Amino acid sequence: MKNLHTQYSARDIETRILEGLRAAGLDPSHRLSPEQLAALDHFHTGGLRASRELLELARIGPGDRVLDIGAGLGGSARLLAYAVGCQVDCVEMSVDYCRGAALLNRLTGLEANVTVQRGSALALPFTDACFDVVWMQNVGMNITDKSKLYAEIARVLKPGGRYAFQEMAAGATPLSYFPLPWATTPEDSILVSAEAMCELLSAQGLSPEIFEDTSEKHLRRSLANATPAAAGQLGLAVYVEDLARKAGNARRSLEDAQIRLLRGVFRSE
């Protein structure tokens, strides 16, 4: 999600994270849990709740090796490692996110379970058939070559492995509200329809076990929980500029069927 934040120096984002934690009443000198950090590091639609639901659908076990593509600050990866005990490799393009994720791994004591490296989703730095699960949340909308993306996912999955994802798809009408969490301008947003996404995945030998539109469910939840953030509350505003406007535009886009929120679990051959 390249447009979600302003690029800071690695030192600056670490400082922002630590200052945000202290402002929220958390002590970085004591071990923190992934749940305590969730408002900060689950910066995808639906936050921690969406990650927990996808975890249940993906049926990840303690013996699984998981790859989190576009991991950001590693919130989902730490949730998986903490809740299940599995090993998670993270690939993230942003240098500052990689540094921030490494910091949060240390603060949660999960650095042995979660590794982070800089890399591209279109050239994954792993050998063939080495992961039981590939995990991705709200990343593909900035990737133009989706055929290459899905080919790389299929390549690193073991036979019978699972691709678990949450993704934005194109709706019935063109996008008109900007900026969005993933796109400052229309040129930044690369969406395909749900039908096209399913076809592209199938072309790489990935078959759907679960494929569903969760747009209306998300809208009902967001309206029910639409309360202003309290002063000093931990959240994405620690490092995301113009957050309220971007989130509001995303909600309007969902309401007007300009985008759809999908999730699925596809199995490799």
Image (cartoon, rainbow, N blue to C red):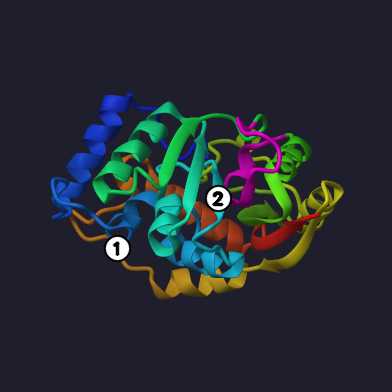
Q: Which residues are magenta?
A: 124-144
- SS assignment at label 2: strand
Which residue is label 1 attached to? 228
Answer above or below: position of 34 versus 225. above
Question: In the image, which disc is placed on residue 153?
Answer: none
In which quarter of the view is residue 167 placed?
A: bottom right
Q: Residue furthest top?
A: 9
Q: Residue at x 33, y 44 (%)?
A: 105
Please identify, in this view, whether the residue under mark 2 or under mark 1 is nearer the observer.
Answer: 2
Q: On the rendered structure, is 78 left or right of 158? A: left
Which residue is label 2 attached to? 66
- Give the mark, 2 or 1, whose residue is nearer the N terminus: 2
Mark 2: which amino acid? Answer: Val
Q: Residue at x 22, y 33 (%)?
A: 15
Check residue 258 for magenta coloring.
no
Answer above or below: position of 240 versus 267. above
In which quarter of the view is residue 148 placed?
A: top right
Residue 244 visible: no
Q: In front: 94, or 109? A: 109
Q: On the rendered structure, is 184 left or right of 173? A: left
Residue 256 visible: yes
What x and y, as percent, mark residue 47? 44, 60
What x and y, as percent, mark residue 153? 69, 43
Mark 1: which amino acid? Answer: Pro
What x and y, as percent, mark residue 6? 40, 31
Q: Residue at x 36, y 44 (%)?
A: 112
Q: Residue at x 55, y 63 (%)?
A: 60
